[in-house]
Amino acid sequence: MQLSDSVETVSGIGPKKAAELAEMEIYTVQDLLQHIPFRYEDASQVTPVADLIVGELVTLEAQVVSVRSFRTRSRVPMTQVVVVDSNGDELDLTFFHQPYVSKQLKSDEWYAFTGKVGEYHGKKNLTNPNYEPLDRVNRVHTGRVLPLYSQHKSISSVWLRRVMPEIVRRTELLPAEYLSETARAEGELASRPQSWQRIHTPESVEEAEQARRRIAFDELWTIFAALDTEREARHALEARKPVTPEHVENFTNAFIENAPFPLTPSQQSAIESLQEQFVLNRPLRQFIQGEVGSGKTLVAAYALFLQASVGGQSLYLVPTTVLAEQHLQNLRPMAEKLGIEIAPWTAASKGSSEARVLIGTHSLLHHTDSFSPDLIVVDEEHRFGVGQREYIWDENHPPHLITMTATPIPRTLAHVLYGNQAVSFLEPIPGKERDITTRVFSPTKLDAHLQWLATKIVEESTQAFLIAPLIEPSETEAFADVYDATTLYKRVTQLFPHFRIGLVTGRTPAAEKQALLEAMRKKELAILVATPVIEVGIDIPEASIITILSAERFGFAQLHQLRGRVGRSGQSGWCFLVPSPGKTAQRLRLLESTTNGHELAELDLQNRGAGEFLGTRQTGWDGLRVATWMDLPLIELVKRLYTREKQV
């Protein structure tokens, strides 16, 4: 048997089981080995009948006294078994839909029974317990720590516990050790092959946890190794356009002289990081995280204009046409002072493909015959798929790449996710901090809130956003109480016929969306009802109120981003969070007292995992089976040991 062999090579797996396993994306022996238990139940301790506690999982060793099979009035097959333990205490066992039990359990024979203790008419019992002969050497379902697996059709935990031992006993199938004894001792790590045995057949819960920790370590190690390999391969290449230290110094002086405002310390630090990489004359990689108002665009402009100053061409990719036009207007005056041609490249407006700096949306990616970029800056990187970037990627001669996001990302996680590139964090520009008050209220108060909102709009001449997660009502029962933008739009237009109100969703045509946003910007609309499509790239200076319905459907990072849509002209702002009917508001109240994006990101990481920060499936990132991105001590251990082992 080989890891690459079909699962049908495993004893007990025929075509029918193989087909069901295929529906679980389990095709090979290796896939089956990597089907990790999601938790364990400890049934290793034997409990006498007298000590049974209702609700607990127990293992009982007892002798069968009697077995009786019959059908209930509703024709359900039922078997009643009476057993007695070594102390002489009796217990009733009930089996439903298992008529074969009467043939398998023999009177006067001893068995181990494992199940959860129930109670019927004041008398304790076990219903449908697992059972095995007491003299069986290698028990699978009783008297041990029981692995619980995700199940599908007839692929049950009981069945998998019978199949897995055959695989893990074949030591040649288990992953080989790669760590030194010193590293394993320092990290208190179990051996790799032994861990793959114990993850499926542990003798104790502690042993299972040790195995899980080692497998998690290996998953993270693989990611570090992949990042390191990519970094080394890139460092062996040359940049498309060489830059000398002298040119960088001269350009930097001119850039600072023409900048619209003085650089902050964190902007200076990010630019210094870029300078160090540019003069190495190999493809640079830089990740920049900074919330709205931290000056990411100016740092991006430095790289764009520096590349242009040596005859290179730069692309600035942003998620929306509106944001592309906004950046073009803001950067054009500075570009002209530096003698750099800058042009748009969106679906609606295309300048010269010969311009040194092109600013546009993903439509830039479909015109690779028009330009060959030397530098790409991607704003809100997770909104562009890896596959989209491949349009303009040349593995043998890749451009410089700078990725930016306003989505708060935990610093430790960022250093791991972007471990093959430099990482910079921009702090808010002093004096530009916004005063946004966040409040959570019950959906029962929504009508009163909307009336208050209308009064605010009239009295303070302000504008508001109303956000809902769904476009239309869902037919799925689980989402029946989740707010949708279409219904919300109808509701507020009926309530306030004297207001101009717009509706923007993911289905809104691009031209219509742009027209509505422009109307909002010109204060021609009082309220914009939308789905989270306005999360980034929308700048409505006069908007000061945002109400987010079914707010529990969003992660903290996304709510923080949506909150950033108001108060953008320095005015005080309001963010209201409304849970769906029947949903708790406890989690949401954390946003009332926390405005720090990094703190919220840490909370998101703990509650929702790394998916909040990774918008596209990348090999390794969201394929973790055991490791979690919230286990920062283990991440730090992997990072430390990887660096040390590589140097040996």
Image (cartoon, helix red, strand yellow):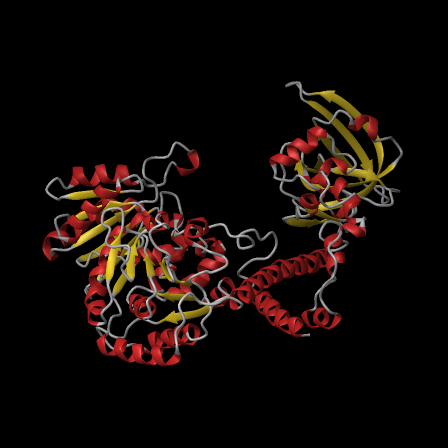
Question: On the image, which quarter does residue 633 sit in?
Answer: bottom right
> Residue 67's x, y, as percent?
81, 27
Q: Nearer the viewer, residue 513 or 253?
A: 253
Residue 641 lies left or right of residue 49; in this view the side is left
Where is 395 relative to 243, above or below?
above
Q: Is residue 604 at least partly visible in the picture? A: yes
Considering depth in this image, is 309 or 71 the residue closer to the camera?
Answer: 309
Horizontal relation, residue 39 to residue 104: left or right: left
Image coordinates for residue 426, horizontal then vertical, percent: 36, 71
Quarter location, residue 493: top left
Residue displayed at 69% across by 43% down: 32
- Residue at point 45%, 66% (across, down): 283
Count numbered badges in the picture: 0
Q: Residue at x 24, y 70 (%)?
A: 432
Residue nearer the viewer, 400 or 477? 400
Quadrant for residue 612, please give it. Answer: bottom left
Percent across and percent down for residue 60 are 78, 44
**Is residue 530 rendered to the left or right of residue 200?**
left
| Towards the viewer: 638 or 572 | 638
Q: Position of residue 392 (x, y in %)?
A: 41, 53
Q: Is residue 53 visible?
A: no
Q: Quadrant of the N terminus?
A: top right
Q: Left or right: where does residue 377 sit relative to residue 127?
A: left
Rendered-image quadrant of the C terminus:
bottom right
